[in-house]
Image (spheres, rainbow, N blue to C red):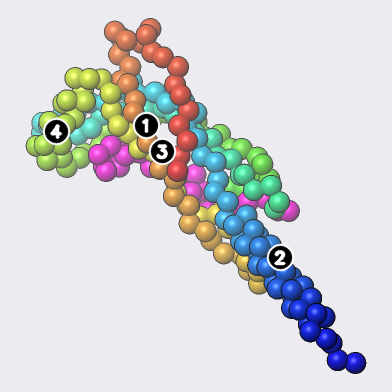
Amino acid sequence: MLCDRDCCRRFCLCYIILLIVLCVCYTIAVLASHVQQKIVIVNANLSRFELTTSPTTSLFFNLSFTMSIHNSLWFDIDAANYQDMEISCYYNTIEFDSIDLGNFGLDVMQTSIVNHSRSGNVTVNLTSNEVDAFKRSSETGYFDIEIWLQGNRMFEDYDGENKPMYMSYPCKLRLQLITSQNSTTQGNFTPVKCH
């Protein structure tokens, strides 16, 4: 028995609705598998940040911070695996410190805390304008620092193969240099979300 016109319309409508539902489910699954991680600088302190120009231009620093790395995926059966993870610290696009986190895993909705504190110095190439900008920042006591978390998060594709998804999260901080004069008046650090 042939289908009448109304029957064909209902069949086509059901078919279109099914296709839309499948497309929506697929889109949700793809977006959910690429959910960004939640990266936050919970606390940071800068107790030394000075530039010397003789015999070479060197940046001396004493920086400490706490970074929270949160696996925000709620549906994974296995732990999220992170590979070749590294934290880099920059002033004016110049990297002055880095931390190799290597490989690690985080279970669903689990958080990893990275505490870092380091003093050191690094030779830098700054133009005279950049040196002047540094001096102006020294006068105000505030420095713009960027802390980047970079690496790969491994995920399983639809063929069951593990593939890397590159992660790059900049954390832009404006830190007040802690000195003996202002150490007692330091305010509470406001956590900074990295994106």
Q: Residues within 10 Å of mark 4 (few under 14, many from 20)?
A: some
Left-right relation of 178 to 30: left
Label 4's element?
helix
Decide if residue 65 is in sight here. Answer: yes
Left-right relation of 14 to 33: right
| Mark 2 or mark 3: whose residue is earlier in sequence | 2
Question: Residue shown at 69%/62% (left/top)?
Answer: 25
- Work out which residue is located at the far right of the displayed protein and give it: 1
Name the residue carrying label 3.
Answer: 171
In the displayed structure, 32 sits above or below 99; it is below
User: How many angstroms separate mark 1 from mark 2 (CA)?
Assistant: 43 Å
Residue depth check, mark 4 versus mark 2: number of the one nearer the observer? 2
* Image quadrant in which you'd find residue 56: top left
Q: Residues within 10 Å of mark 2 (few under 14, many from 20)?
A: few
User: How many angstroms separate mark 4 from mark 1 (CA)?
Assistant: 20 Å
Name the residue carrying label 2.
Answer: 21
Q: Which mark is residue 131?
A: 4
Left-right relation of 2 to 130: right
Q: Main secondary structure of the magenta part?
A: strand
In the displayed structure, 145 sits above or below 165; it is above
| Mark 4 or mark 2: whose residue is earlier in sequence | 2
| Mark 4 or mark 1: whose residue is earlier in sequence | 4
